[in-house]
Structures are given as C-alpha cells and as structure tokens.
Amino acid sequence: MKEIIPLWAQPWLDVIELATQIALIVLAAWLLRLVLRRLVRRIGERYNLPPELVIGSRRLTSFVIYSTALLLILDRFGVSGTVLWTAFTGFAAVAAVAFFAAWSVLSNIFCTLLIFTVRPFRLYDQVELLENGEKPGLKGQVVDINLIYTTLQESLPDGQDTVLQVPNSLFFQRSIRRWRSGVQG
C-alpha cells in the first residue's frame, strides 16, 4: 500500500488514518442518532406517549450516543477511558466535598441578603428566636448584622451583658418574636 501513496504523503499516513477514523465515528454517531430519534418518535406516536417522555428519551439517546462517540474519539488519540473515568470521579468527589463544606457559609450569606431585603428585624430591635411554644429561645438586642452572623446583645439578670453570634440561616428556620428599636417585651 505504501507504494501506491506518493513519498510526500507517507509521513502523513498516520494523521490521515486518524482523521478517517474520527470522521467515521462522527458519521456513525450522527446516523445512529438520526435512526434512534426517528424510532423514538414513531414509538411515541404509536403508543400515544406523553411528549415530555418522548423529548426526554430523544435527549437521553443523543447524550449517550455523543458521549460514546467522544470517548471513542479520545481513545483514538490515546486517552484511556479508565483515566477519564478516574479523573471525572475524582473531580466529582472533590466538588461534592467542597460544595458540602461551603453549603453552610453560602446559606448564611444568602440569608443575610434575605434579612436585608425582607427585613424580619432591624438593627437595634429586640428579637427572640423561639425553640418551640414552651421553651424560651435566644433573646437579645440586634447590635450587628454581617455576612455570616447576627450579633445579639443579651442582658442577663445579674447585670452582665453577653453577646450571642447567631448564624443568619437560623432566623429562617425558627420563629422570631420581635420588639421594635429597644422596646422590651
């Protein structure tokens, strides 16, 4: 076969072979997708399936076909599917841990935005977070609201003043009793 190909093209033989394989993979994926989309549409019409199911099935088959084609193309370039899977699962695990770790911080930041827009209480209001109907909760005057915490200054019966830092998300998980601008209740 090398005798048929001109001398100038022989160094490019590997590249031409790779390009041909990739073109065949893309063509096969496109044809398979076309056939399966038509098949899913006909099954949907024949059995009177809901349009949402037909559309979802078509999208799922397209995703599977194109993902498989991508893996086959990457395999032609020498990238192992095992390496890709390991990298993907490693990334997913790190992303899940990072998301879980940041969840409470992000939740408190979002609740801060809600406190400033919905205004369930304001600076210098007296508030009480109620545990339930029978037990008293956290109570104090709002002296600061930052991204993570709302600071409550509580006056104890022995005359001492202490400060509570309450996560902002807690104000949206419990009932709040509020007295306006320092008026004790």
Image (spheres, rainbow, N blue to C red):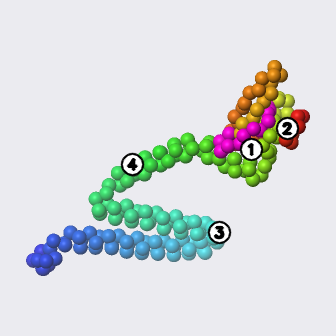
According to the picture, the residue beneath numbered tag 3 turns out to be: 50
What secondary structure is found at the residue carrying circle 2?
Answer: loop
In the image, residue 85 sits, relative to residue 138, either above or below, namely: below
User: What whole-number distance in Å separates the C-alpha atoms at marks 4 and 3?
Assistant: 37 Å
What secondary structure is found at the residue carrying circle 3?
Answer: loop
* Span colored in magenta: 137-149
According to the picture, the residue beneath numbered tag 4 turns out to be: 86
User: What whole-number distance in Å separates the C-alpha atoms at marks 2 and 1?
Assistant: 22 Å
Tag nearer the camera, 4 or 3: 4
User: Which of 175 and 119 lies nearest the eye of the viewer?
Assistant: 119
Q: Position of residue 117 (x, y in %)?
A: 75, 53
Q: Residue at x 55, y 46 (%)?
A: 99
Q: Are marks 2 and 4 in contact (CB under 8 Å)?
A: no
Q: Residues within 10 Å of mark 3 (few under 14, many from 20)?
A: few
Quadrant in the picture for the N terminus: bottom left
Q: Is residue 138 visible?
A: no
Q: Is residue 147 left or right of residue 29?
A: right
Q: Amino acid at mark 1?
A: Phe
User: Which of 133 and 66 lies nearest the eye of the viewer?
Assistant: 133
Q: Is residue 5 left or right of residue 63?
A: left
User: What whole-number distance in Å separates the C-alpha atoms at marks 3 and 2?
Assistant: 60 Å
Tag nearer the camera, 2 or 1: 2
User: What whole-number distance in Å separates the C-alpha atoms at marks 1 and 3?
Assistant: 39 Å
Q: Residue at x 26, y 69 (%)?
A: 18
According to the picture, the residue beneath numbered tag 2 turns out to be: 182
Of the numbered discs 1 and 4, the one sitting upstream in the chain is: 4
Q: Is residue 163 visible?
A: yes
According to the picture, the residue beneath numbered tag 1 turns out to be: 172
User: What whole-number distance in Å separates the C-alpha atoms at marks 2 and 4?
Assistant: 59 Å
